Amino acid sequence: MSDINCIKNLRNNKGLSISQIQKILGVNWRTVKKYADGDQLPQEAIKPKKGMMYEDKWGEMVADWLFEDQKLKRKSRRTNKELYNELTKYGFTGSYRTVCNFIKEWKNSHQEEKDSGHERLEHPPGEAQVDFGVMEAVQDGELVDVRALIMSMPYSNVGFAVPLPSENQECFLYGLKQLFIQAGGVPKSLRIDNLTPAVKQTRSKIEEAKLTDEFMQFQNHYGFEVQVCNPRSGHEKGSVENKVGYIRYNFFTKAPVMKNFEDLTMQLKQKLQDDRERLHYEKQVLIKELWEQEGKYLLALPEKDYPIFREVLAKVNKYNEVKMDKALVHVPRGYNYSQLHLVLSWDQFKVVSPDGEILLEDFRPYMNKRKALPWLSIIKTWVYKPRVLNYSRYRDYLPGRVREFLLTDNLLIRRKRLESLSTLLVTHDMKRINEEFYDLIERDQLSSDSNPYEVDWNQYDALTPMEEVGK
């Protein structure tokens, strides 16, 4: 187009002849004539198809046969080869590939195909979506897998979260109860996927999803409606799917330090409250203001508290052990009874005899499930770069005594202490080192070089809050 504009300019504005333009540009004389004096009008690029299938009767014959076959079962329809053979009986001289190409184009333009796009949904106030997200936190210097139950309110884009140790029924119902308390009310409707604690049979083409009895009882108490998504259709609850990712990438990129699950719940609650001070991604209104409007549509919390627990019968082996959460739990005098009753809450359990005697009460096995941080590898990295310790992401995960022991300002002394700690980690874990800290210092297994600025270890525990000492 720039060449055409140049020719037009030389012809109309400069007044040059066709021959002069041809010599200047070195272009064929007829080409210059065409663009200098002719009009270049836009034309449609779509041209009618040509060929024997479109210009002769053959295309109409095949189209009629395909239309007839659409009414039959698939196994009764003619194949491309059979249609080609039929055409040859009427004198068709084209190739089999020509017929196949025509059939493919006809099917693409005449068959009703399922639209693969999604419809934008409207979310009224008071509607919520719930899902679990798997994240990590650090407790006592060890990694803990956290199942965060997250509730999103699509109208205002407000989020609520409760970290839990598992995705079983007790955790799910307890988590929902805590989410309602955080919201200050109960959503009118709750959209969930096919969570095992809530759905015992997924939706099929002929039957709706069936809810578990325990979840239906919980639903009746709080009064909300339930919408179950289709299997493998995460887009139907896209708001909470996005909220899970938002919380993971904004609040869990560095695993937070938690004292317990209640402490982590309060941390998340505060962060999500602060997060409401931003604009809604679409409505360009503060999320906090939208939530104030939406909160008026929530149902009131019931006056009576709903207890969350589950009772199961358990058999005891000859070693006085019952199986719980894929672990064997020792129950004193348990083998004296043929069966025991387990009363399970989200974090604790009770073992009750048939006579009603509580034989054992403790935290559930998964509450103590941990993964050790790779401390040996981390400490070895700090040995070569001791200054990194001051701003390392792992600094806050160190137990209290060990952290203060390493955070000396003298880098030479710090390096020496890191070296002795790396040697000790071959036979001890970090938690044990923190617990036996004074004994290790006395046995000189941890470097105790004098340092005018170091902590007086005899006074450290007395001056430090007990929860910090135990870290």
Image: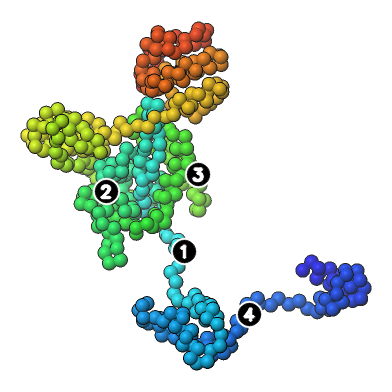
Residue at image mark 3: 278
Of residues 205 and 251, the one drawn nearer to the viewer in this rendering: 205
The amino acid beneath tag 3 is Arg
Mark 1 vs 2, N-terminal side: 1
Residue at image mark 4: 47
- The residue drawn where x is 49% and y is 15% is 417
Mark 4 vs 2, N-terminal side: 4
- The residue drawn where x is 33% and y is 53% is 192
Residue at image mark 2: 197
| Residue 358 can be seen in this image | no
Q: Mark 1 to mark 2: distance in Å?
A: 31 Å
Q: Position of residue 136 (x, y in %)?
A: 40, 36
For the N terminus, which image quadrant? bottom right
- The residue drawn where x is 46% and y is 88% is 86
Mark 3 vs 4, N-terminal side: 4
Which of label 4 and label 1 is nearer to you?
4
Q: Mark 3 to mark 4: distance in Å?
A: 53 Å
- Please tell me the numbered disc located at residue 311: none
Which of label 3 and label 2 is nearer to you?
2
| Residue 387 can be seen in this image | yes
Mark 1 vs 3, N-terminal side: 1
Disc 2, SS: loop
Q: Is residue 454 above or below residue 124?
A: above
Q: Mark 3 to mark 2: distance in Å?
A: 34 Å
Which of label 3 and label 4 is nearer to you?
4
Residue at image mark 1: 117
The residue most toward the left is: 355
